[in-house]
Image (tube, coloured by chain):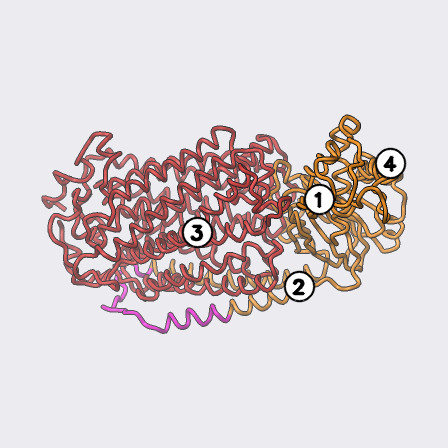
Amino acid sequence: MNDKAEHTPELNYLNAGHTVKSWLLTVDHKRIGILYLIAMTCFFLIGACAAALFRIELATAAPDLLANDTYNRLFTMHGIIMVFFFLIPAVPGVLGNFLVPLMIGAKDVAFPRLNLASWYIYMLGGMFTLAAVILGGIDTGWTFYTPYSSVYADSNVILAGSGVFITGFSSILTGLNFIVTIHKMRAPGMRWMRLPLFIWAQYATSIINVLGTPVIAITLLLVVFERGFGFGIFDPQKGGDPVLYQHLFWFYSHPAVYIMILPGFGVVSEVIACFSRKRIYGYEFVAFSSLAIAAIGFFVWGHHMFTSSQSVYAALIFSVLSFLVGIPTAIKIFNWTATLYKGSIELSAPMIYTLGFIGLFMVGGLTGLFLATMAVNVHLHDTYFVVAHFHYVMVGGMMFAWLAGLHFWWPKLFGKMYNSFWAKVGAVIIFFGFNFTFFPQFIAGYMGMPRRYHVYDTVYQPFQMLSTAGAFFMGSGLIICFVTLVASLFSKKHCGRNPWKATGLEWMKAASPPDPHNFTSPVVVDVEAYDYTDERVYEDA
Amino acid sequence: MKALQTTPDAASSYANQLDVLYWFLIGVSVFFTVAICALIIFFAVRYRRQSDADRPEATRDGKLLEIVGSVIPFILVMIMFFWGAKLFFDARMPPSDSIEVLVTGKQWMWKIQHPNGKREINDLHVPKGVPVKLTMTSEDVIHSFYLPSFRKKMDVVPGKYTQMWFLPEKTGEFRIFCAEYCGTEHSLMIGKLIVMEPHEYEEWLNRRWVDGGGAEMAAASTDDPVAAGKQIWEVNCAAACHTGRPGSIAPNIVHKFGTMRDLEDGSQILMDENYVRNSMQNPNDDLAKGYPAAMSSFKGVLKPAQMNQVIAYLKSQSEVAAE
């Protein structure tokens, strides 16, 4: 570790320009990734503060802190911001932008200017949504169900709906950009079956983004038209059908769950391979299971609507397809676990997040089976069981994968290594805090507690109190994690090109932080992904 | 302190059947969670980088894991699917001997009407041992009628009727929740299901309102817009003009709310709130086909609130007719 490359490279993407303009008008995919990272962290903090407030309110059954309308606005804001401005764009926006060209040996994405436009569109959508919040909030829930949203709600539906509508275009454009980049810009020798699984996951996600997002866009536009101009589309008073809205909404929003989680699968595959020093077991199965999930995921939306008055026969089809989507997911979990077998395992911070991910995501997936079971769904629909289930998938799954990825590629992003001890402490606290927060909600849900309740029956109070205590425990873990990462930026010590001794072009061929043009010499790929028997992985510099 | 409850009361045998399926699902989930977590922990310790465990060069991919890992989950999920579908279909088919109760959801209350016309709000009295079929609609947004002790819920949707049924097998009081977010007081849109012995129920059903509880009184009083509207309608409209009999000077519109009406000028108009209100104020704007311009304006005669009550009554009549 005393090599000449152990200091920050003379020229890298971070110091290539210091002006604000050089950041705001950059077309470098790495800088755009950092722009996303900063914006997304702010949105995440706003969403988390909303959650902290209503978690305090929910600690007791009585309404003691917030008025009912305030409570309704807070959970709506939490949902909209976390789903549309954190969960959906986090991994593609930050890690995808940063890593897709690096991992396939390209100089940039296929359309760098479009990539910058995506970020501006995302920010514009975010500003609309924040304006809705500042001008009095929105109280429809993140699902915008009609006719409440289109006729009855007395809050800023049009502004918030427009915000989500606009942000959708950012997803579509980023998706298009990645699809073209992955098809056309792979380095010589980077065959499809040599791609890192992160790329496969980004590819599957991009396809869903391009196919699904236009549907939510047009749906929200219809809500805005009905509310603003009195179109009769969902309002039964005008001959509309409120349940039609739910079909349109979930046609996108169920696949959106896979938009959130598939990139996470990609991260997990990279981290497990690196810290087991092994190729991912069943590479092809893991790669194609992403595509299978993306495809089947488009035909399961009706499982959100078993009690909505949709046809019972339609419900039957949606139920069976929902079960089938569980199988490729199970395959992934088995393969990740099998990868550990006879590996050389190092429990670094990213690895702790990743192993936590497997456990939590598995609970999220298995409780999904409860909800796919039609009769059980009728009892559990719209209760805290559903809240717990999707937080296990979204937070236990996606957020853990995101933090795993952030900790894994942090040295590549900034050329600095964080304090490994405190990063691990943060990871462990977040893991236990998460379980304290959300596991009791499964029980409260089966006990029949409906979601989005501001005041509730005292039988549910023990579960809600545990939940609130857990949330603050988890919050303290997130603060440790945040401080640890930010503190590393001030360290003088450089982490080296490949501190984890990982495979992949971003580690083996690019500096940390990478050159503005990514690679300083031509890249040719001559090995499979995750070849940890290759001596070159262990070379310094 | 009594032991913490982890499943809700079961008030029907269906609830018990559902709990069996639930425990089966828990069993499968716990098995896989424990198995995978145990493997992860075991591998993480046994194959930690510092250990001298035997690591043969290549453990390349085998097909066995993928096949076993697909087939076993497939069999398990198919069991869940068929089991859940069977219970679901049972839960959706009301027996033909059910008593039928009308439920109207409204921000933020449940309005109940029994077969003999008796009304109540947020309480639902039913006899033990007789299946109850609820026919439900909403006056405004989507609500959802949820009976946790029966493990059943059904959305209550404006503009259409939905149904659910249940068989009460235990006397007592059980919770009713609104499960679909419906606005400011969503969490206060709760009610009570009261299951009574059949003879008590009969007595209750036929009892006059005056000795009932507060909610029942309120429902029967003229605070109820439908009842108030009915009174206005009968005195001002139905007595001479909209009699509903053939040959009347004015059309019979009592059951027509929400339908398209033919006009004298050949066009059509939807009979909605705006149409009714405007017709009360400016009767000659949209003349009904085949009828003279004989109606006098009620502008200034009826207060806006009273007009709303008439609309509510006409609306309620069309809801009854639509069944």
Distance between the Cα atoms at labels 3 and 1? 49 Å
From the rendered image, report the letter of the chain displayed in orange: B
Three-letter code, disc 3 = Ala
Q: Is residue A180 above or below residue A484?
A: below
Three-letter code, disc 1 = Leu
Residue, disc 4: B235
Chain A, colour shown: red
Sequence-wise first label, 1 or 2: 2
Residue at 19% x, 35% y is A492
Tags 3 and 1 touching, CB below 8 Å: no
Q: Is residue B203 left or right of residue A251?
A: right
* Foreground label between 4 and 2: 4
Residue B17 circle label: 2
Sequence-wise first label, 4 or 1: 4
* Foreground label between 3 and 4: 4
Of residues A438 and A32, the one nearer the viewer is A32
Three-letter code, disc 4 = Val
Q: Are the residues flagged by discs 1 and 2 from a single subunit? A: yes
Residue B263 circle label: 1
Chain letter of mark 4 equals B
Distance between the Cα atoms at labels 3 and 4? 57 Å
Question: Whole-percent x and y of residue B18?
Answer: 64, 61
Distance between the Cα atoms at labels 1 and 2? 56 Å
* Foreground label between 4 and 1: 1
SS assignment at label 1 = loop
